[in-house]
Image: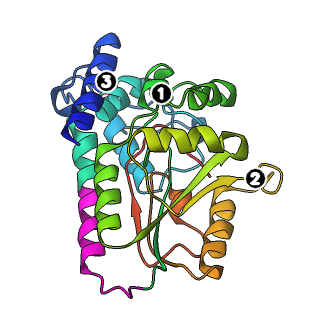
Amino acid sequence: MKIIFVLLFTLATSIATSHGLDLDHGIDFKIHPLRLKSGSGGHYIKGITCSSWRLGVETHNIIDWKTIPQECEDYVGNYILGEQYREDSKVVIGEAYFYAKSLNLTKDGKNIWVFDIDETSLSNLQYYADHGFGVEPFNATSFNEWVELGKAPALPETKKLYKKLLSFGIKIAFLTGRSESQRDITAKNLKDVGYNKYDKLIVKDAIKYKGKTAVTYKSVERKKLEEEGYRIIGNIGDQWSDILGTNTGKRTFKLPDPLYYIA
């Protein structure tokens, strides 16, 4: 695990260096008290800093945004590559672990924890570093090319939780917005970085869910799990759409992600 963390940190440092970013605790407050000229929907927001914008995003008060504000590219880069992102993730994972540890579970093999994949279990940091940390509009073609490489590293804190849950006898389901055509490469990527044991890898049927939101898709798939007899005791993702809707489970956890928004 230490080796994986070091490799991920080395990758982040390399990316940051190539982008000229300062990694002092993830945020350089002298450089980034940036004021936004535009916000969600392109509206002018007076007196809002990039850190306040990120808070609005993480608390689901700023929604339906397509890209991060241009002025916040360096700020988001500093945050996502720096110590603060890792510390924020540790808090979420720590709470999830202590919650799971506290449960008095029936030992019938029906307790399951739902994990999102992108920016929850696997990191697409390299892709987003090469595309402005969310400043550039999402390009499905280029992102899918990245996915097909199968090189996304595991997020270290999430992997720790994954291993602890398995030791508690809790089964794992991966529920992702990736398509059926990406199932095999996703399974290989998961295995390559250490997610070797799970009961379900649920990918999106593009035809069935055409025009449907991520909230609707994930709600339907979680309901199917429950109809199969599983008890969803935990549900973790980086997007609000991962944990909203119906059949969300006994408790949900939201990891930080200011890079993009999925409705």
Where are the magenta residues, as a range?
A: 91-107
For mark 1, give the secondary structure.
Answer: helix
Separation (CA) of disc 2 from disc 1: 25 Å
Residue displayed at 40% across by 28% down: 72
Say which amino acid is labelled 1.
Answer: Tyr
What residue does disc 3 label?
A: 11
In the drawing, what numbered circle is on residue 101? none
Tell me the SS state at disc 2.
loop
Quarter of the view holding residue 12: top left
Question: Could one spot residue 210 in this view of the protein?
Answer: yes
Q: Is residue 175 magenta?
A: no
> Residue 191's spot in the image, x, y percent?
46, 44
Q: Say if mark 3 contacts mark 2, CB within 8 Å.
A: no
Q: Quadrant of residue 15?
A: top left
Question: Which callout, 1 or 3, points at the residue further toward the start of the chain?
Answer: 3
Q: At x 39% / y 40%, what residue is drawn?
A: 193
Task: Look at mark 1 in the image and give the residue it sits on.
Answer: 128
